[in-house]
Amino acid sequence: MENKRKHLEFIQLTITRMTVNSFFIKGWTITLIAALFALSAKDANAHYLVIAFFPIPVFWLLDGFFLWQERLFRALYDKVRIVDEHKIDYSMNTSHFVGGRNTWTRSVFSMTLNIFYGFLIFILILVIKFIS
């Protein structure tokens, strides 16, 4: 049982790291957008807000990548959980789980990321309309 437990711990640590990375990406996105809001309010210039449209898709795609990796490692976790302990090989290869729900595109356009980044874009458009 010790081999299985160790392998599951390795996988869980990787899942946690992907979750933390996703959290940091969201934090950086909010920080950058807030800084650009502050610059545009100080100078009453909507050009700073137009610049904010460029990092949002980049952070959205990067966040989608981390979500995709998290989903792949969760699938690996589920597989290792039911495998016989004598067949544990400590493999962290997730390539055979790619497909179906576990694609990068489906992760980028997941409901949670759509709501988060869509809301940011919506607020950005409203503020640009308000300032202009």
Image (cartoon, grey):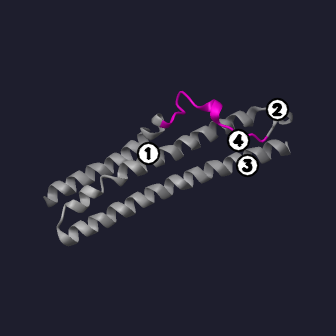
Seen in the image, is 11 located left or right of residue 118? right
Measured Cα–Cα span from mark 4 to mark 2: 16 Å
Query: Which structural element holds mark 4?
Result: loop
Q: In the rendered structure, which disc, 2 or 3, sits on the residue that comes first in sequence?
A: 3
What is the crowding at mark 4: few (fewer than 14 residues within 10 Å), some, or many (at least 20)?
few
* Residue depicted at 18% across the width and 65% down the height: 45
Query: x, y (%) of residue 122?
Result: 27, 49
| Location of residue 35 with respect to 82 vertically, above or below | below
Q: Which amino acid does the dot numbered 1 rest on?
A: Leu
Measured Cα–Cα span from mark 3 to mark 4: 12 Å
Nearest to viewer (mark 4 / mark 2): 4
Q: Nearer the viewer, residue 96 or 13?
A: 96
| Location of residue 16 with respect to 88 vertically, above or below | below
| Picture disc at residue 24 | none
Q: In the rendered structure, which disc, 4 or 1, sits on the residue that comes first in sequence?
A: 1
Q: In the rendered structure, which disc, 4 or 2, sits on the residue that comes first in sequence?
A: 2
* Residue depicted at 16% across the width and 54% down the height: 129
**Residue 41's quadrant in the figure?**
bottom left
Nearest to viewer (mark 3 / mark 4): 4
Q: Are marks 3 and 4 in contact (CB under 8 Å)?
A: no
Residue indicated by mark 3: 9
User: Is 96 included in the stretch rendered in magenta?
Assistant: yes
* Residue depicted at 21% across the width and 60% down the height: 47
Residue indicated by mark 1: 61
| Picture disc at residue 92 | 4
Measured Cα–Cα span from mark 1 to mark 3: 28 Å
Residue indicated by mark 2: 84
Quarter of the rendering occupied by the C terminus: bottom left
Query: Which structural element holds mark 1?
Result: helix
